[in-house]
Image: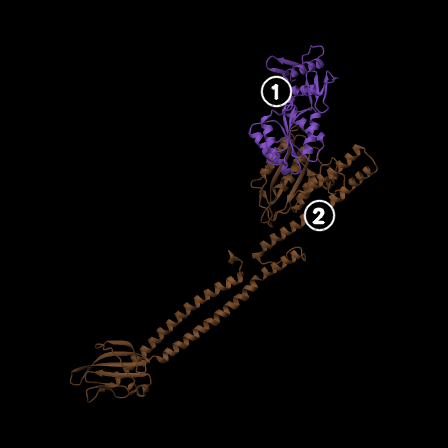
Amino acid sequence: MARSTQSLQVRLLVTLALLLLAAAGVAAWALDSMYRDLGLRARQDVLEAQVIALIASADIDAEGRLVPENLAEPRLAASGSGLYAEIVSSRGSWRSPSALGSGLNLAATPATGERRFEYARLADSSRVLGLSLGIRWVLEDGSSRDFIIRAAESLEPWYEEVARVRAWLLSGSIVLGVLLLAGLAVAMRVALKPLHQLETEIADIEAGHRELLGSGWPRELAGVTGNLNALLAGDRKRLERYRTTLGNLAHSLKTPLAALRGLIESGHTDRESNLRQLDRMQEIVQHQLKRAVFGGTGATMTDLPVQEPLEQLRGALAKVYNDKSPRMAIAVAQDTAYPVDIGDFLELAGNLMDNACKYCRSEIAVRAMPWTSADWRRPGLLMDVEDDGRGIPPSERSRVLERGARADESVAGQGIGMSVAREIAAAYSGTLEIGESRLGGARVSVRLPGR
Amino acid sequence: MRLLIVEDEPALLEMLARQFRSAGFAVDLAADGVEGEFSGKEYPIDIAVVDLGLPGMSGLDAIRAWRKAEKSFPVLILTARDSWQEKVAGLDAGADDYVTKPFRFEEVLARVQALLRRSGGWSQPLLTSGIVELDTRSQEVRVAGTPVELTAFEYRLLEYLMLHAGEVVSKTELTEKLYEQDFERDSNTIEVFIGRLRRKLDPDGDRQPIETLRGRGYRIARD
């Protein structure tokens, strides 16, 4: 998807802005309708109070109209005050002085005891809310007459207030939204800072200014940076090994090359002497190749269950040592697995088992089990390879492990399997130790740590 | 002994062929995996030497194909990479032993002879039948402790019979195994050589180390 290249920050901000807009809209609508409801109720209460006040002060005049004797509300007396009243009956009607010339035109004619609210427009087209109440007035002679008492109030001032509140709500929401988005942008910059830091550090590594990522990464990034560091360290180790191997190779080929050149230049044509130098060079190449094959670092490896490769090695060695046919016992604890390259593991175990078969009298034993520690999320690996041969005396052990480690050392006829195995173990930050087997011969113990 | 070499490097193929022939083998050659697979399936070979890295069909696939076709002759693999991963793959596919390149011919020969002995049921390089002794390493033959001079073909014939000691070996089998594919064959030749061999091993004619089973072939007794 093309959009996936867009900045996370921009995507988050756009989404949040849309969400905020929707939330502000809903909130403003709710506030507005609540305010209007309350306002209308208040207007209605005012009108009812006016109507009741009118009834209280009214009496029948000479012409048979019902007329308030005094106006308690001064707004009814002032023209154009916005508060109006009238009392109508079949005998004629009374209007408050404020209503004169206003064009007040309420139409509702409720029955006795009934009241009706209505909206109407005055002559100047301003809007009013009116209340009409039907009453029956009992005269002194015991007869009765029906009147409609009306009060109306201009809605304009209230509408203006509603408009003001709406404007205030709108601008308030906008300011709040902008402030929230700005705050979010800042918060995201702060939260994403480690990512920028990571980017910078990786660029530094590429440029060769630093070798590994620093420490103290937030928990969410620690896994990634840890793996990256392991990968980088493994890469560097491998590079160093290649360099060493190349250096050793070139260096160690010099001597036989010089000898060969000397033999040829001096007219020496002894076939055996020339062949000896060639053999030496062959040995050197083979030896360095063997040391260079393994892959190293377990940072990106998936767990390799070790039972099957050990069985494969047993099958292979049974053929190679057919004449001797040693008994080969393999005991692997259930679910023993380790993040190791299959080639590296076969090389490690193959060299050790090969040696055991070579030096045993009649039997070898291989044991493998997980190596657990509270510090590790993934367990390490413990592996013992034993034989019933003559063993390796303590004084010889370090020599066996170092054998062939220096390329210019003569390796003729000497197996370098053990030292290659030790180097593979070291590439996985592990160790290899030689001890005594309960079978009577040597026991080689490999310990590869977990992570 | 009839030996198949599958190797794509012409110089190496030629060198191995020459040396195995002078060591008394009838040699069939294949320069790639497809040809090698065909030869291994179609010709009555006793042993194969196979390079693992081949064009066309890999050495591993050729070995697997032979084993699937129930060809049980021993196979020696030549590996360029001295890694256990490759050795395990080769031995797992059905090979019986390996030699790592570069190698000395003596080493390859020793492995081939060991595999042949093993497939004949011998666990030692010294094959014996009665008073006849044959040392596959030095290619020396003794009768009652006295060395006997044999020609190359006579030696091959005796070695084949002794490796298959206790079994009846037909004349057809011998012609097939001792001659290369394109060799002019004459069934009487075997009879002539058997006659010479008998005179050399048993000049007085009282021991009869090589038994003739009329219409079926020859047999050397197994101790």
Which residue corresponds to the image point at 62% horizontal and 60% vertical from the top-left? Answer: A200
Q: For mark 2, give the secondary structure.
A: helix
Q: Nearer the viewer, residue B71 or A12?
A: B71
Instruction: Answer with the quarter of the image where residue A149 lies.
Output: bottom left
Between marks 2 and 1, how big is the CA–CA gap? Answer: 56 Å
Q: In the rendered image of this protein, does residue A375 appear above or below residue A11?
A: above
In brown, which chain? A
At label 2, which amino acid type do we have? Arg
Q: Name, please, the residue furthest toward the bottom.
A: A62
Give residue B133's mark: none
Looking at the image, residue A241 sits to the left or right of residue A42; the answer is right
Which label sits in the foreground, 2 or 1? 1
Give residue B173's mark: 1
Q: Chain of mark 1?
A: B
Q: Chain of mark 2?
A: A
- The lab-note entry on whether marks 2 and 1 share a chain reads no
In purple, which chain? B
Task: Please state the horizontal and vertical placement of residue A438, each as a whole percent of the image.
Answer: 66, 35
Q: Can residue A388 be seen from the camera position used here?
A: no
Q: Nearer the viewer, residue A231 or A3?
A: A3
Task: Please state the horizontal and vertical placement of residue A316, each as a whole percent of the image.
Answer: 62, 33
Q: Name, please, the residue furthest toward the right.
A: A266
Q: Around disc 1, counting alpha carbons within 10 Å, would you say few (fewer than 14), some (14 to 19), or many (20 or more)?
A: few
Give residue A243's mark: 2
Instruction: Answer with the quarter of the image where residue B170 lies.
Output: top right
Looking at the image, residue B35 sits to the left or right of residue A127; the answer is right
Q: In the rendered image of this protein, does residue A150 appear above or below residue A437?
A: below
Task: Please state the horizontal and vertical placement of residue A68, each as a whole percent of the image.
Answer: 25, 86
Q: Nearer the viewer, residue B55 or A192?
A: B55
Q: In the rendered image of this protein, does residue A251 appear above or below residue B39?
A: below
